[in-house]
Image (spheres, rainbow, N blue to C red):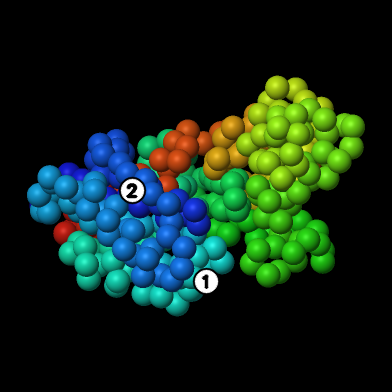
Amino acid sequence: MRASYAIGLDVGGTRIAAGLVERKGRIVKETRCSTPKGGPFGVVDAIIDAIGDVAGGVHPSEIAGIGIGLPAQIDFGRQTVEFCTNLPLGGVDMRGLVMSRAKHSVTIDNDGNAAALGESRFGAGKGARDFVMVTLGTGVGGGVFIDGHLYRGHRGLGGEIGHMVVELDGHECPCGAKGHIEAYVARPAIIREAREVAKTFKGAGILRRADDDPERITAEIVVAAANAGDEAAAEIMGRVGHILGETLVGLVNLLNPQLVLIGGGIGESCPLIIERATQAIAAEALAGRRDVRVIPAELGNDAGVVGAAALAFDEHDSREGLHR
Ligand SMILES: [Zn+2]
């Protein structure tokens, strides 16, 4: 039977979003909550509650399954959580724990992969067979589509764009290694640079937006200031775009994608990032590949939810012998 709905969850380090999603990607019911601190069981409890919230009133046979995007490195084939830096989920059988209580089949994937899948089916990547998506927020995630399929690599761990090296022996990345792009362009790096410049006259505009308290500077404040033309903020966000673009040059040369989608809370809200990334690619990519379009993702925070639901539909349909 072709079930009409799937439940998609986007589990982040600070927030969990869940949605009841139709096959065409429309979210018909959604809920959000904070991610519980502490051990994995609190996270599982919150996931179960969120599933209950969105599934209420729908007959179980109408639900294809549950898809969950986690901020973790997932061995997709074995459906196991290998590493997780922001939540204590490494080595935890998240799929089994949720499945035993939710009574639906569960598919887990990396959150960047889920968001890329969402954009591919229902957003800015629709119709593109080869594209790269980068999500820029608290961390840097992403997904790579090759020939119409999400590229997962040998063990399903591929697509970690945030951990490409941009500087030899550079800043320490949250993953523990050095010089990865996440350490240069994600929220903490933007805040660090803004607080530094706020100590000088040049940073007065940023500081004013934070009620003159450097501790209250957020990445959103820096983005808003840059979008309003503040010079110091524009310099910071321009550098983010430049570093991102230089990193993307390698991917553009390697993969020759049709599109690069820039998503995530920071990526979608700052046109300067796209402008500078486009300039870097135009200047540095090999000839013949420069027609790649760098564009913002379309689905915002919903990308992870609808992408996770798409995973559940895919799993259900292949189990039932249905084809998309
Ligand atoms: Zn890293």
Q: Earlier in the sequence, mark 1 or mark 2?
A: 2
- 169 up-or-down from 251: above or below: below
Q: CA distance from mark 1 to mark 2?
A: 22 Å
Identity of the residue drawn at 67% across and 55% down: 182
SS category of the residue bearing label 1: strand
Disc tally is 2
Quadrant hosting residue 200: top right
Nearer the observer, 110 or 318? 110
**Amino acid of disc 1:** Phe
SS category of the residue bearing label 2: strand
- Return the mark for residue 83: 1
- Return the mark for residue 18: 2
Foreground mark, 1 or 2, reads 2
Give the percent coordinates (x, y) of residue 160. Answer: 58, 59
Give the percent coordinates (x, y) of residue 95. Answer: 32, 68
Q: Is mark 2 within 8 Å of ligand 1?
A: no
